[in-house]
Amino acid sequence: MPMPENQKNFCYKNIIWDWNGTLLNDLDLCVGTINILLADRKLPLLTNGRYKEVFSFPVKQYYEKAGFDFTKEDFAIPAREFIEKYNAKVNNCNLHFTANAVLEKFRIKKVRQFVLSAMKQDMLEATIRYHRIFDYFEKITGLDDHYAVSKIELGILLLKESRLNKNETCIIGDTLHDYEVAEELGVDCILIADGHQSKDRLLTSGVKVLNSLEELALYSG
Protein backbone atom coordinates (compact mmCIF):
# COMPACT_ATOMS: atom_id res chain seq x y z
CA MET A 1 0.00 0.00 0.00
CA PRO A 2 2.27 2.81 -1.25
CA MET A 3 2.54 6.02 0.72
CA PRO A 4 2.23 9.38 -1.09
CA GLU A 5 5.69 10.76 -1.80
CA ASN A 6 4.63 14.25 -0.76
CA GLN A 7 3.66 13.08 2.71
CA LYS A 8 6.49 14.45 4.84
CA ASN A 9 5.22 13.13 8.15
CA PHE A 10 3.09 10.19 9.05
CA CYS A 11 0.24 10.37 11.50
CA TYR A 12 -0.13 6.71 12.42
CA LYS A 13 -1.57 5.86 15.80
CA ASN A 14 -0.23 2.29 15.70
CA ILE A 15 3.17 0.95 14.68
CA ILE A 16 3.87 -2.75 14.26
CA TRP A 17 7.62 -3.27 14.38
CA ASP A 18 9.57 -6.12 12.90
CA TRP A 19 12.40 -7.14 15.26
CA ASN A 20 15.35 -8.87 13.55
CA GLY A 21 17.17 -6.47 11.27
CA THR A 22 14.76 -3.61 11.95
CA LEU A 23 15.32 -2.82 15.62
CA LEU A 24 17.93 -5.50 16.39
CA ASN A 25 21.15 -5.23 14.36
CA ASP A 26 21.83 -8.94 13.91
CA LEU A 27 22.99 -8.99 10.28
CA ASP A 28 26.61 -9.91 11.05
CA LEU A 29 25.53 -12.65 13.45
CA CYS A 30 23.17 -14.15 10.87
CA VAL A 31 25.79 -14.10 8.10
CA GLY A 32 28.48 -15.48 10.38
CA THR A 33 26.22 -18.24 11.65
CA ILE A 34 25.00 -19.39 8.24
CA ASN A 35 28.61 -19.38 7.04
CA ILE A 36 29.56 -21.82 9.81
CA LEU A 37 26.88 -24.18 8.53
CA LEU A 38 27.97 -23.70 4.91
CA ALA A 39 31.62 -24.31 5.79
CA ASP A 40 30.70 -27.52 7.61
CA ARG A 41 29.15 -28.72 4.36
CA LYS A 42 32.03 -27.44 2.21
CA LEU A 43 29.73 -24.96 0.45
CA PRO A 44 30.66 -21.42 -0.69
CA LEU A 45 30.34 -18.78 2.02
CA LEU A 46 28.15 -15.69 1.81
CA THR A 47 29.30 -12.10 1.92
CA ASN A 48 26.98 -9.60 3.58
CA GLY A 49 26.04 -8.32 0.13
CA ARG A 50 25.23 -11.77 -1.23
CA TYR A 51 23.28 -12.60 1.92
CA LYS A 52 21.06 -9.54 1.40
CA GLU A 53 20.30 -10.76 -2.11
CA VAL A 54 19.32 -14.33 -1.17
CA PHE A 55 17.67 -13.91 2.23
CA SER A 56 13.92 -14.44 2.03
CA PHE A 57 10.86 -16.06 3.61
CA PRO A 58 10.10 -18.82 4.08
CA VAL A 59 13.64 -19.40 5.25
CA LYS A 60 13.79 -22.85 3.68
CA GLN A 61 13.91 -21.16 0.26
CA TYR A 62 16.69 -18.88 1.48
CA TYR A 63 18.70 -21.90 2.65
CA GLU A 64 18.30 -23.46 -0.79
CA LYS A 65 19.47 -20.26 -2.49
CA ALA A 66 22.45 -20.20 -0.13
CA GLY A 67 23.46 -23.65 -1.34
CA PHE A 68 21.89 -26.24 0.97
CA ASP A 69 20.69 -29.44 -0.70
CA PHE A 70 17.63 -30.85 1.00
CA THR A 71 17.77 -34.05 -0.99
CA LYS A 72 20.83 -34.85 1.14
CA GLU A 73 19.54 -33.73 4.53
CA ASP A 74 16.30 -32.57 6.05
CA PHE A 75 15.78 -28.81 6.36
CA ALA A 76 15.19 -29.24 10.08
CA ILE A 77 18.86 -30.19 10.62
CA PRO A 78 20.54 -26.93 9.53
CA ALA A 79 17.57 -24.91 10.81
CA ARG A 80 18.08 -26.34 14.29
CA GLU A 81 21.86 -25.87 14.09
CA PHE A 82 21.41 -22.25 13.07
CA ILE A 83 19.03 -21.44 15.91
CA GLU A 84 21.28 -23.07 18.53
CA LYS A 85 24.32 -21.10 17.36
CA TYR A 86 22.34 -17.88 16.87
CA ASN A 87 20.69 -18.03 20.28
CA ALA A 88 24.05 -18.58 21.97
CA LYS A 89 25.33 -15.23 20.67
CA VAL A 90 22.26 -13.08 20.04
CA ASN A 91 22.84 -11.02 23.17
CA ASN A 92 26.11 -9.85 21.63
CA CYS A 93 24.05 -7.93 19.07
CA ASN A 94 23.20 -4.28 19.61
CA LEU A 95 20.07 -2.41 18.69
CA HIS A 96 20.32 -0.31 15.56
CA PHE A 97 21.61 3.22 16.08
CA THR A 98 18.82 5.53 17.35
CA ALA A 99 16.43 2.58 17.98
CA ASN A 100 15.91 3.66 21.59
CA ALA A 101 15.43 7.27 20.58
CA VAL A 102 12.85 6.37 17.91
CA LEU A 103 10.89 4.16 20.30
CA GLU A 104 10.92 6.93 22.92
CA LYS A 105 9.83 9.49 20.34
CA PHE A 106 6.76 7.46 19.41
CA ARG A 107 6.02 6.76 23.08
CA ILE A 108 5.98 10.50 23.75
CA LYS A 109 3.65 10.98 20.78
CA LYS A 110 1.39 8.32 22.36
CA VAL A 111 1.71 5.97 19.38
CA ARG A 112 0.78 2.41 20.27
CA GLN A 113 3.74 0.15 19.50
CA PHE A 114 3.79 -3.60 18.85
CA VAL A 115 6.30 -6.22 17.72
CA LEU A 116 5.48 -8.87 15.10
CA SER A 117 8.43 -11.17 14.50
CA ALA A 118 9.44 -14.46 12.88
CA MET A 119 11.53 -15.20 15.98
CA LYS A 120 10.27 -17.84 18.42
CA GLN A 121 8.09 -16.23 21.08
CA ASP A 122 10.14 -17.05 24.16
CA MET A 123 13.44 -15.98 22.58
CA LEU A 124 11.82 -12.83 21.19
CA GLU A 125 10.61 -11.75 24.61
CA ALA A 126 13.96 -12.60 26.20
CA THR A 127 16.00 -10.55 23.72
CA ILE A 128 13.66 -7.57 23.96
CA ARG A 129 13.87 -7.69 27.75
CA TYR A 130 17.66 -7.97 27.53
CA HIS A 131 17.78 -4.66 25.67
CA ARG A 132 15.46 -3.07 28.24
CA ILE A 133 12.85 -1.92 25.74
CA PHE A 134 10.08 -4.39 26.65
CA ASP A 135 7.85 -1.71 28.16
CA TYR A 136 7.66 0.26 24.91
CA PHE A 137 5.43 -2.41 23.39
CA GLU A 138 1.79 -3.08 24.10
CA LYS A 139 2.05 -6.60 22.69
CA ILE A 140 4.96 -8.74 21.47
CA THR A 141 4.10 -11.51 19.02
CA GLY A 142 6.42 -14.21 17.70
CA LEU A 143 6.10 -17.66 16.13
CA ASP A 144 5.56 -20.98 17.92
CA ASP A 145 8.57 -22.68 16.31
CA HIS A 146 11.94 -21.93 14.72
CA TYR A 147 10.97 -22.36 11.07
CA ALA A 148 9.92 -18.75 10.34
CA VAL A 149 7.25 -19.54 7.76
CA SER A 150 4.94 -16.53 7.90
CA LYS A 151 3.79 -13.72 10.15
CA ILE A 152 0.53 -13.13 8.31
CA GLU A 153 -1.78 -15.22 10.51
CA LEU A 154 -0.26 -13.75 13.67
CA GLY A 155 -0.62 -10.27 12.23
CA ILE A 156 -4.31 -10.77 11.50
CA LEU A 157 -4.82 -11.95 15.08
CA LEU A 158 -2.84 -8.99 16.42
CA LEU A 159 -5.03 -6.50 14.54
CA LYS A 160 -8.18 -8.17 15.84
CA GLU A 161 -7.14 -8.64 19.46
CA SER A 162 -5.69 -5.14 19.80
CA ARG A 163 -8.59 -3.56 17.87
CA LEU A 164 -6.30 -1.66 15.54
CA ASN A 165 -7.78 0.58 12.86
CA LYS A 166 -6.07 -0.48 9.63
CA ASN A 167 -6.07 3.06 8.30
CA GLU A 168 -4.09 4.22 11.34
CA THR A 169 -1.57 1.37 11.37
CA CYS A 170 1.86 0.95 9.77
CA ILE A 171 4.26 -2.00 9.71
CA ILE A 172 7.93 -1.03 9.85
CA GLY A 173 10.31 -3.75 8.69
CA ASP A 174 13.43 -4.58 6.71
CA THR A 175 12.30 -7.27 4.25
CA LEU A 176 9.83 -7.79 1.44
CA HIS A 177 8.04 -10.25 3.70
CA ASP A 178 7.13 -7.35 5.99
CA TYR A 179 5.61 -5.64 2.94
CA GLU A 180 3.75 -8.86 2.05
CA VAL A 181 2.40 -9.08 5.59
CA ALA A 182 1.27 -5.45 5.44
CA GLU A 183 -0.49 -6.09 2.12
CA GLU A 184 -2.34 -9.09 3.56
CA LEU A 185 -3.31 -7.12 6.66
CA GLY A 186 -4.40 -4.10 4.61
CA VAL A 187 -2.10 -1.66 6.42
CA ASP A 188 0.69 0.68 5.31
CA CYS A 189 4.35 -0.29 5.33
CA ILE A 190 7.69 1.48 5.60
CA LEU A 191 10.86 -0.50 4.93
CA ILE A 192 14.29 0.24 6.40
CA ALA A 193 17.25 -0.67 4.16
CA ASP A 194 19.61 -1.33 7.05
CA GLY A 195 18.79 -4.96 7.73
CA HIS A 196 18.52 -8.28 5.95
CA GLN A 197 17.67 -7.29 2.37
CA SER A 198 19.22 -4.83 -0.06
CA LYS A 199 17.68 -1.46 -0.81
CA ASP A 200 17.25 -2.42 -4.47
CA ARG A 201 15.14 -5.42 -3.47
CA LEU A 202 13.07 -3.37 -1.04
CA LEU A 203 12.38 -0.69 -3.65
CA THR A 204 10.57 -3.28 -5.81
CA SER A 205 7.75 -3.18 -3.24
CA GLY A 206 6.74 0.35 -4.22
CA VAL A 207 6.40 1.49 -0.60
CA LYS A 208 8.50 4.06 1.24
CA VAL A 209 12.07 2.83 1.75
CA LEU A 210 14.35 4.66 4.20
CA ASN A 211 18.03 4.05 4.78
CA SER A 212 17.99 3.91 8.56
CA LEU A 213 16.00 4.42 11.73
CA GLU A 214 17.64 7.83 11.94
CA GLU A 215 15.94 8.73 8.64
CA LEU A 216 12.68 7.36 10.05
CA ALA A 217 13.00 9.71 13.02
CA LEU A 218 13.35 12.65 10.65
CA TYR A 219 10.61 11.41 8.32
CA SER A 220 8.11 10.98 11.14
CA GLY A 221 8.40 14.64 12.13
Image: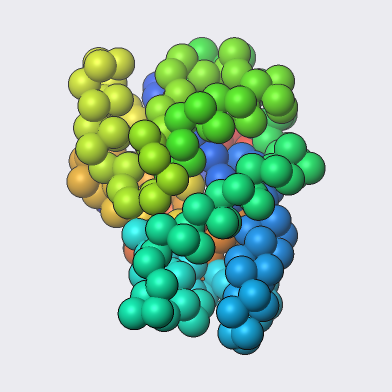
**220 above or below 132?**
below
Residue at screen point 55% across, 25% down: 125
**37 above or below 43?**
above
Residue at screen point 56% across, 56% down: 81
Looking at the picture, the colour scheme in use is: rainbow
**In this rendering, position of residue 83 left or right of residue 130:** left
- In the rendered image, residue 29, in percent from the top left (x then y), is placed at 70, 56
**152 above or below 43?**
above
Viewer-side residue, 109 vs 19: 19
Viewer-side residue, 97 vs 57: 57
Residue at screen point 43% across, 19% down: 139
- In the rendered image, residue 206, in percent from the top left (x then y), is placed at 35, 63
Tell me the quarter of the picture where residue 73 sits.
bottom left
Q: Residue 96, can we see it?
A: no
Tell me the quarter of the picture where residue 59 sits.
bottom left
The quadrant of the picture occupied by the C terminus is top right
- In the rendered image, residue 189, in percent from the top left (x then y), is placed at 38, 46
Viewer-side residue, 123 vs 133: 123
Q: Residue 221, can we see it?
A: yes
Residue at screen point 64% across, 43% down: 87
- In the rendered image, residue 86, in percent from the top left (x then y), is placed at 64, 50
**In this rendering, position of residue 47 left or right of residue 142:** right
Total labels drawn? 0
